[in-house]
Amino acid sequence: MISTTNMLHCVSLSGRKTILFAGVFAAGAFMSPLLGQSPAPPANTNTGQIAQAAPAVAPGSSAITAFPKREHSYYQLFWGVDQLSVRAVESGELIKFSYRVLDAAKAKTLNDKTNEPALYDPAIRAKLVVPSLEKVGQLRQSSTPEAGRVYWMAFSNPGKVVKRGDRVNVVIGQFQINGLLVE
């Protein structure tokens, strides 16, 4: 049988533990936002204003997906396209390849219906194709390209074999681009 003094002693011990736990929890909750903040930018000594640091990467882009300048210039000069990107869409069931046309005559190969596009993931040896739906047709834009417009095509990704972070190659007729990062 437990005496009342032992019972009170147990209650007071558990009460201390609860208070100690609550104190540690409150301190952690208060300190975590403070620890996650970046340091304040330095003040400009001449004007007294805070100096704005330039972002390391342009908004909406990623340093990982950026091409070397020479490769970027190659696609602009020879194929008349830029802003090449590959994204997993529809929960990864489709992989969307998009590009902006700079020169419609040079980019004609990419929109030509006779050229069958393919997306390759060399790491897993997978080949994805543009599906052709009964009522819609192929999931790609094949109209005559116009400068300044963005075009796309969607590759079927059964079993979600190609995932975000994979490096893929896109081939459309004579056009080929290697090492695009799936976003």
Image (cartoon, rainbow, N blue to C red):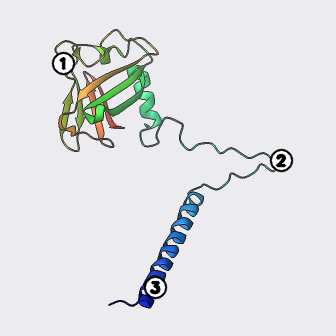
**Residue 142 left/right relative to 12:** left
Q: Residue at x 48, y 74 (%)?
A: 18
**Image label count:** 3
* Of labels 3 and 1, the one closer to you: 3
Q: Residue at x 33, y 27 (%)?
A: 97
**Residue 157 left/right relative to 17:** left
Question: What's the amino acid at mark 3?
Answer: Leu
Spot occupied by residue 113 in the image (x, y as percentages of width and height): 24, 13
Determine whether the residue tagged by mark 1 lies in a helix, strand or loop.
strand
Q: Are marks 3 and 1 in contact (CB under 8 Å)?
A: no
**Label 2 – label 1 distance at C-alpha:** 64 Å
Question: What's the amino acid at mark 1?
Answer: Ser
Query: Can you identify the residue that label 2 sits on?
Result: 46
Question: What's the amino acid at mark 2?
Answer: Asn
Spot occupied by residue 87 in the image (x, y as percentages of width and height): 34, 33
Q: Earlier in the sequence, mark 2 or mark 1?
A: 2
Q: Residues within 10 Å of mark 2 (few under 14, many from 20)?
A: few
Q: Mark number for residue 8?
A: 3
Q: Earlier in the sequence, mark 3 or mark 1?
A: 3
In the rendered view, tell whether residue 144 sits above or below residue 4.
above
Q: Mark number for residue 112?
A: none
Determine whether the residue tagged by mark 2 lies in a helix, strand or loop.
loop
Determine whether the residue tagged by mark 3 lies in a helix, strand or loop.
helix
